Structures are given as C-alpha cells and as structure tokens.
Image (cartoon, rainbow, N blue to C red):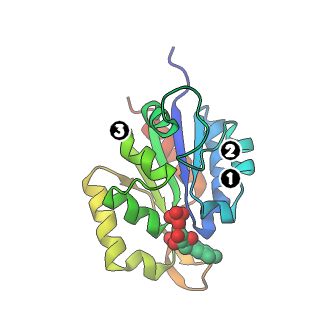
Amino acid sequence: MSGPKTLVLGVTGSIAAYKSADLASLLVKQGHDVHVIMSDSAQRFITPLTMQTLSKNPVMTAVFADQDGWCPGHVELADRADLLLIAPASAAALARLASGLAEDALTCVALAARAPLLIAPAMNGKMWSHPATVQNTEVLRARGATFIGPDAGLLACGYEGAGRLWPVEEIAAQADEMLRRD
Ligand SMILES: Cc1cc2nc3c(=O)[nH]c(=O)nc-3n(C[C@H](O)[C@H](O)[C@H](O)COP(=O)(O)O)c2cc1C
C-alpha cells in the first residue's frame, strides 16, 4: 500500500491568501502530506502559524533557513513533491515562474521540482488581462502547467471581472485528482 502523497502548497501575496487556510485544511483531510511555502508578501496577509497548524507541518518561508542535515531544504522538498500547487498565485509569482527566477523559497522549489504544477491565480482583473501576465501564463501552460481559474465576479479591489481565486473546494478536488493519476 502506498503512503500519503506529498503536496507542496505555495501561497503568494494576494488578498485571497486567507483562503489558503481552508485549502490547506481540505488537502490534509484528503489524506495528503501538505507542506506550505509562503512568500514574504503572503505573510502580510496570513501567518505561517495558521498554515503550520492547519497543514500539520513546518512552513517554509526562506531559502536561507536552518535545515535538517546537509541537503538544502528547498531541494529536499522539491524532490519529495508529488504535486506543486500554487494558490493563490500572484501576478509577480507567475512572472518569476515564467522567467525561471529562483529568488525565493517557492521559486527555488518550483525550479528544482519535476512534479506536476497546478496554478490557481488571483489578482486584479487588469493585472490578469495585462499582456505580460497573458504571456507568462502562456509560457507556463506550454511547459505543462495546469491552470485552474481565475473566477469572474466582484474583486476585492472593487472591480468586477476575472481575477477571483477559484473556489478552494474545486482546487482541492483538482489537486486530489492529479495526485491519484499515477
Ligand atoms: C492589499 C493588497 C492586495 C493585493 N492583492 C494582490 C492579488 O490579489 N494578486 C496579485 O497578484 N497581487 C496582489 N497584490 C500585490 C502583491 O502583493 C505584490 O505584487 C507582491 O510583490 C507579490 O509578491 P509575491 O509574488 O512574492 O507573493 C496585493 C497587494 C496589496 C497591498
């Protein structure tokens, strides 16, 4: 019998970051081993303590942190990942991922991992429809990333349009389906 799958949940600096607490909880209830990575901006919206408690694992917030043993923490986590889910994914994170920039813990793990990548963007509608973001998503899709959302509706910034984080129940269901594929 195979053990639980390792799901790495990247949380970036969107107002929707508060929803990642429910998402982490749902993923744990599905039986997965959930490891959260938070960008600096994400920590302005929700605390690592919340994510650590709900994911039942330590949260990675920096590349240069204390590590167990000799292997860099981001490489160790990247090697263990069966799925990398980024929810919410900020416009800035999409740009870093598309460019292959490894300048924070999440993008280091993303570059070092070979697991499938599931991305749930959340941002202002104009940020989402900006040619730079459109191009970044096309690059990531061409490399095999799966996108879920964004949803349309009233955005936190006051605008109406595409940019809302997809419902977390459906993100969790999609992640679960991808983890059960092999
Ligand atoms: C109140 C507030 C809400 C924000 N919401 C979003 C958002 O939903 N999506 C987004 O891409 N950026 C949003 N930003 C801007 C990002 O936080 C900013 O681009 C940041 O540099 C992203 O960093 P990260 O990708 O490392 O998490 C918001 C900023 C503020 C102050």
Q: Which residue is found at the position 45% from the left and 62% from the top?
A: 93
Spatial CA distance of label 3 from label 2 is: 25 Å
Q: Which residue is mark 2?
A: 25
Asked which secondary structure carries label 3, the reply is loop
Whether ligand 1 has any atom under 8 Å from the Cβ at mark 1 is answered as: no
Q: Which residue is mark 3?
A: 114
Is 68 positioned to the left or the right of 163 in the image? right
Amino acid carrying label 2: it is Ser
Q: Classify mark 1: residues with Cα within 10 Å, few (<14), some (14-19) or many (20+).
A: many
Spatial CA distance of label 2 from label 1 is: 6 Å
Whether ligand 1 has any atom under 8 Å from the Cβ at mark 3 is answered as: no
Task: Give the percent coordinates (x, y) of residue 161.
Answer: 49, 80
Task: Give the percent coordinates (x, y) of residue 43.
Answer: 66, 60
N-term mark: 1 or 3: 1
Is 25 positioned to the left or the right of 67 in the image? right
- Which label belongs to residue 21? 1
